[in-house]
Image (cartoon, helix red, strand yellow):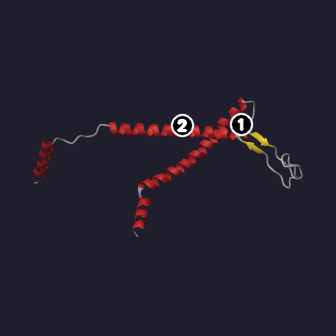
Amino acid sequence: MGMIKEFKEFIVKGNMVDLAVGLVIGGAFGACVKTLVEKVIMPPMGYLMGGIDFNARKWEIAPALAKGEEHPVYGNIVEKDIEAVAIGYGEFAGTIINLIIVGLAIFIVVKLINSMKRKAEEAPKEEAPPADIALLTEIRDALKAR
C-alpha cells in the first residue's frame, strides 16, 4: 500500500504536470520547426542549388528492380518489385538543420527565462524594519486597539 501512496504523490506533484505540459508544447513546437525547415528554409536552398528538391537528394547504392527482372548480383529472377537501396543524405541534412533550429530556439528561451529570473532576484525587496521599530509599532497598534 505504501508504494501506491508514493506513486500517487509522485503523479500529483507539480513537477509531473510541468513535464506533461512541456512535452505537449515541445511536440507542437517540433511540428512548427519541422514545417519551417521543410517549407521555408529548404525550398530556397534547393533553388540556390539549381532548383532541386534537397530532401529528395540521395545516393543510390542499388537500383530498383521490377518483378521478372534478373537480379544483378544473385542472377535469379525477381519475384516481386524491389525498391532501390539508397542513402538519403538530403533528408538527413534537413533533419540536422531542424535540430540546429530547435537547439537555437531552446537556447534563446532558456536565456530569456534566466534573465527574467535574475531581474526578479535583483528587484528591490522591502526590508523588514529594525526590531526596535517593529516593537514600537506593535505597542502603538495595541494602544490604538484599546
Q: Secondary structure at mark 1?
A: helix
Q: Is residue 110 left or right of residue 131?
A: right
Residue ID for mark 2 = 104
Q: Earlier in the sequence, mark 1 or mark 2?
A: 1
Going by the numbered disc 2, the residue's amino acid type is Leu
Q: Is residue 46 left or right of residue 8?
A: right
Q: Is residue 29 left or right of residue 121?
A: right
Q: CA distance from mark 1 to mark 2?
A: 22 Å
**Residue 10 numbered mark, or none:** none
Q: Position of residue 146 (x, y in %)?
A: 10, 54
Q: Taking 7 as reference, is 29 above or below it?
A: above
Going by the numbered disc 1, the residue's amino acid type is Phe
Q: Residue at x 60, y 42 (%)?
A: 33
Q: Taking 57 as reference, is 8 above or below it?
A: below
Which of 56 and 143 lies nearest the eye of the viewer? 56
Q: Taking 120 as reference, is 4 above or below it?
A: below
Q: Taking 91 as reference, is 14 above or below it?
A: below
Q: Residues within 10 Å of mark 2 (few under 14, many from 20)?
A: few
Q: Position of residue 79 (x, y in %)?
A: 86, 55
Q: Residue at x 57, y 49 (%)?
A: 27
Quadrant where the N terminus sits is bottom left
Which of 68 and 146 lies nearest the eye of the viewer? 68
